[in-house]
Image (spheres, grey):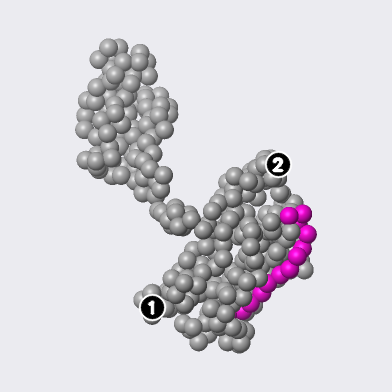
Amino acid sequence: MSFVILDLEWDSAYCKKKSGFINQIIQIGAVKLDDDFRFVDSFSRTIRSQVSKKVTKRFTELTGITTENMLAGVSIDTAVSEYNEWVGEDAITLTWSTSDLYAIMSNVKFLLRDGLKFKIGKYVDLQSFVQNELRLKGHEITNQISLSAAAEILGVSTEMFDLHTALDDSTVTAALLKMTYNRERFLPYIKDASDPEFYKKLTFKAYYINKLTDKRVEPKHLTFICDKCGNEATRSKKWKYKNHWFTGEFICLKCGNKFLGRVMFKVTYNGLKVAKRILQPTERNKQDVSV
């Protein structure tokens, strides 16, 4: 088994085939480690754009890759074919966040020749894993952490690297993997990217139901139990919808308790998630009663 840490640099360009803009991959960089995290090999290719004659100013400022560098590169078909051969078999591919996967999907669909794909079997989002490891060490991580910020926290010097170039980014990412790896906690992060369902789940955008007439809304979802006596309460006024929440006024006919019942319906790839809360009109305290 080997670990392949993959990083991509891409630039936005108009693609006629897509009839819109695409994040075209301009550079592929990767580092291969053995199962003891020893360096095995590296891979780097700059890609010649097939949809634009030059790179954007912002891309050059960020990566240092000029239009001249891009024009001197190889075709994307050549770069991906060479990368796939270099990866070999039985490798776990890691990227810093899943953003590179979105670029890969659009480039496969609109730029690569039919049937040519990046060889990615087992896959790990290393950003997600490292964030969890940092939390376990007591660091407060609330938002997605950047590669440079994670390196700083873990004491990995980036002075000798040119971040935002694919090979250097993958090298720094490899160092973070080596520092944070814990087999027991790492294994659950491994996903099967060869399964088409992996990409369907990745691209699925969760949404909220905003009409109670939706067939997925069941009568039990709109039922509330009195938090004072445990009796089923009766809704006294019409539902109101705001900020994804349906809110209704309820009264318990047994004990006279009045409260607001709130319910939210979120549709995820794995199905419907229902959240319910009770809000006391006077105390304004929220209490989760069902998720």
The mark closer to the camera, 1 or 2, is 1
The kind of secondary structure element at disc 2 is loop
Q: Is residue 8 left or right of residue 275?
A: right
Q: Quadrant of the N terminus?
A: bottom right
Q: Is residue 43 left or right of residue 213?
A: right
The kind of secondary structure element at disc 1 is loop
The image shows a total of numbered marks equal to: 2
Q: Mark 2 belongs to which amino acid?
A: Lys
**Residue 17, numbered label:** 1
Please give the name of the residue rendered at 59% of the width and 44% of the height, measured from the top-left corner: 188
Q: Position of residue 13 (x, y in %)?
A: 46, 77
Which class describes the residues within 10 Å of circle 2: few (<14), some (14-19), or many (20+)? few
- Give the residue pinned by disc 2: 137
Tell me where residue 61 sits by quadrant.
bottom right
**Residue 224, numbered label:** none
Q: Which residues are magenta?
A: 35-47
